[in-house]
Amino acid sequence: MASGWRLWSRLKSSSLRNFISRRNSIGFGAAAVGGVATGYYFLLLSAEEIELHPPLYPWDHNGWFDSLDHASVRRGYQVYREVCAACHSMDYICFRHMTGVTHTEEETKAMAAECDVEDLDDDGNVITRPGKPFDHLPKPYPNEIAARAANNGAKPPDLTFAVMAYEGNEDYIFSYLMGFQDPPAGIEVAEGQYYNVYFAGQGTSMAPPLFNDMITYEDGTPASASQMAKDVCTFLRYTADPKHDERKHYGMKALPILAILFLTSLYWKRHIWSAVKTRKVLYRKL
């Protein structure tokens, strides 16, 4: 009986050792394969595949109670009109959206009248008339084919909601506008493309759009490249979120009301439960 027990113990310990050995072999093999795969991945990883994330900038309108800088919004519209509008459209913005925000009603009407808009007369004939405040901002190209043909096969995106469309919002757009530079040694970009450190892949079809003193601001602000990038980003924040200031304005009005409701509900809760929390329960033996 004792010899049988010893034999069974030897078999059990031998099986256990074999199991542990096989498990360790599988674990070491998986670790080796993972290490080789990781090393191979980093060998294939090139500088062109490393995406540089934009820094966080202290925008004036990022605070809970901070409104847009309307002077900057106006300057940003000027940058869009004189620089960006040559390639990029704003299909969801009308001239009337500028009234009371960046321009007066008379200025808006004058800006709209500078554009020729195709319309229909009473007989259904196509006519050209001066623009009106309810008209949309003019498009740079008549169709997508013309847009791609003029931009090396790439269609310039609509800028109405550009701030919301990219991760990083204004930070990314500002960094992108300021991120054009000569490619470093060993990096080549395709013909017709430009190197930008913040663009995914670093090769973009858009040429550097902003240069110092390329426009003259109406208010006399120095038109440096960074100033124009900051102003157009502020303008794009407005086009993507026209209710930005109004939403924060209503939030400031709602906070005192919510505070009064909170204090009232707190008092009512204490009043209702005070009898329950302060009662004393006595038990008598019968």
Image (cartoon, grey):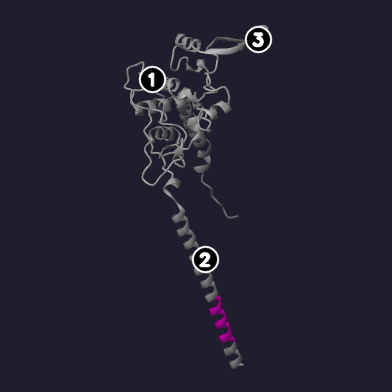
Q: Quadrant of the C terminus?
A: bottom right
Give above or below for 174 relative to 278: above
Q: Residue at x 54, y 49 (%)?
A: 282
Q: CA distance from mark 2 to mark 1?
A: 61 Å
Along the viewing direction, whichever of 55 and 281 lies nearer the viewer: 55
What's the amino acid at mark 3? Asn
The numbered mark, 3 or 1, whose residue comes first in the sequence reads 1
The answer to if 10 sits in the magenta stretch is yes
Q: Residue at x 50, y 64 (%)?
A: 33
What's the amino acid at mark 2? Ala
* Residue 182 image point, x, y percent: 37, 38
Q: Is residue 121 visible?
A: yes
Give above or below for 156 relative to 128: below
Q: Are marks 3 and 1 in contact (CB under 8 Å)?
A: no
Q: Residue at x 45, y 32 (%)?
A: 206
What's the amino acid at mark 1? Ala
The image quarter containing residue 196 is top left
The numbered mark, 2 or 3, whose residue comes first in the sequence reads 2
The numbered mark, 2 or 1, whose residue comes first in the sequence reads 2
Q: Main secondary structure of the magenta part?
A: helix
Q: CA distance from mark 3 to mark 1?
A: 41 Å
Query: Residue 125: which disc?
Result: 3
Q: Are marks 2 and 1 in contact (CB under 8 Å)?
A: no
Give above or below for 286 relative to 230: below
Give the residue at mark 1: 71
Residue furthest out toward the right? 123
Q: Secondary structure at mark 2?
A: helix
The answer to if 168 sits in the magenta stretch is no
* Residue 165 image point, x, y percent: 51, 33
Give the residue at mark 2: 30
Question: Which one is in front in this view, the residue at disc 3 or the one at disc 1?
Answer: 3
Q: Which residues are magenta?
A: 8-19
